[in-house]
Image: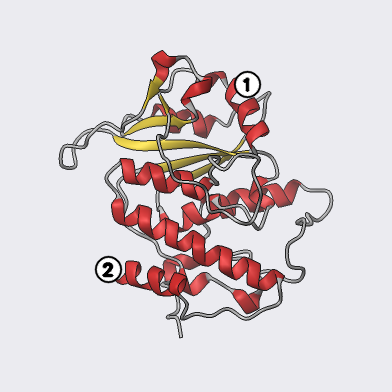
Amino acid sequence: MPQAPPAFHALPHAVSRLRASRLARSSKPFLARGGPRGERCTGCRLLPSHCLCALRPLLPVRAGVCLLMADIEPLKPSNTGWLVADVVADTFAFGWARTEVDPALLSLLADPQWQPYLVFPGEFVDSARVVTDVQPREGNTGRRPLFVLLDATWPEARKMFRKSPYLDKLPVLSLQSEQLSSYKLRRSQRDEHFCTSEVAALCLALAGEAQAAQVLEAYLDVFTDHYLKAKQQQPVDADDAAHQRLRGLRLG
C-alpha cells in the first residue's frame, strides 16, 4: 500500500487556493464535462476511491513556475497545472482577466531573485524576444528561472498572450521538442500542443532539473490512469508500470 503523504501535503498550494477563490465567486456549482460524478477529494480532485494524495511527490526544485490561468481552468478536475503545484514547491497561480492584473503577479515578475521566461511558441513572436535555452546556473548564484505558463486552451492562450501587455518585456522561451503529447484527458487539434504539466516538465529539464522533470512526467501518467479508471468505474492497479516508475523516481 502507498505510504501516507507527509503533513505538509495537507497545506493547500497555489492552484488549490486559486480554485477555492474561484469557487467562492461562482453563482452555481461547476460541473466537469465527461468526468466521473460524485464527491471529490479536496487534495487531488479525484473520487475518493481513486485518490492520488498518497503519491504526491514534492521535490526541492530551484526553478519556479508561474501559472496564469484562464477563468475556469482552476475548476477543471482534469487541469494539470495542479500537478505542477504538487511537485514544484515554488509554484504561483493567478487568474487571468483582460481588464485587470493582480498586483501580486506584477510583484512576482519584478522580484530580483527570479528570471521570468514566458513560455510560448516562437512562431507567433517577434524573433528578437525568442530564446530556446535557459541561462546556465553558477552554483546557487544568479537569478532563479521562473517559467510563466499560460494555462488555458490554445485559443484562450493566444488571446491571453496578445492582451497581457505586462508580459511584453519578458523573453519568450520557445520549446524545441520532437516529443508528441501523450496527454489523454483533453484533446488538442495539434499533437505538438502539450498540456500544462508536460510543458512544465520540459522547462524543468532545460533548467537542469532532470529528476523533477521525470517525476512530473511520471506523476501525470499516474494521475491520468486514476482519472480515467474513475471515469470507467474500474479499480486502479497500484503495481502497474506507471505506478512503479513514479515510486522509483520518488525514492531515487
Q: Residue at x 42, y 37 (%)?
A: 147
Q: Nearer the viewer, residue 189 or 148?
A: 189
Q: Nearer the viewer, residue 81 or 218?
A: 218
The count of marks equals 2
Residue 64 quadrant: top left
Position of residue 201 in the picture relative to residue 12 (left or right): left
User: Seen from this angle, which residue lies furthest left?
Assistant: 139
Q: Identify residue type, mark 1.
A: Lys
Q: Residue at x 42, y 15 (%)?
A: 127
Residue 144 higher or lower than 160, as above or below: below
Write down the residue under mark 2. Answer: 252
Q: Are marks 1 and 2 in contact (CB under 8 Å)?
A: no
Position of residue 189 in the picture relative to residue 169 (left or right): right
Closer to the chain start, of discs 1 and 2, is 1
Position of residue 22 in the picture relative to residue 63 (left or right): right
Please rate how many residues cluster around mark 1, counting C-alpha atoms within 10 Å: few if below 14, some from 14 to 19, many from 20: some
Q: Residue at x 78, y 54 (%)?
A: 30
Q: Position of residue 49 (x, y in %)?
A: 64, 79
Residue 230 higher or lower than 170, as above or below: below
Q: Identify residue type, mark 2.
A: Gly
Write down the residue under mark 1. Answer: 163
Q: Residue at x 43, y 62 (%)?
A: 218
Please rate how many residues cluster around mark 2, counting C-alpha atoms within 10 Å: few if below 14, some from 14 to 19, many from 20: few
Q: Position of residue 16 (x, y in %)?
A: 58, 55
* Alpha carbon distance from label 1 to label 2: 43 Å
> For the C terminus, which image quadrant?
bottom left
- Label 2: state its secondary structure: loop
Q: Position of residue 101 (x, y in %)?
A: 60, 28
- Label 1: state its secondary structure: loop
Residue 114 higher or lower than 140, as above or below: above
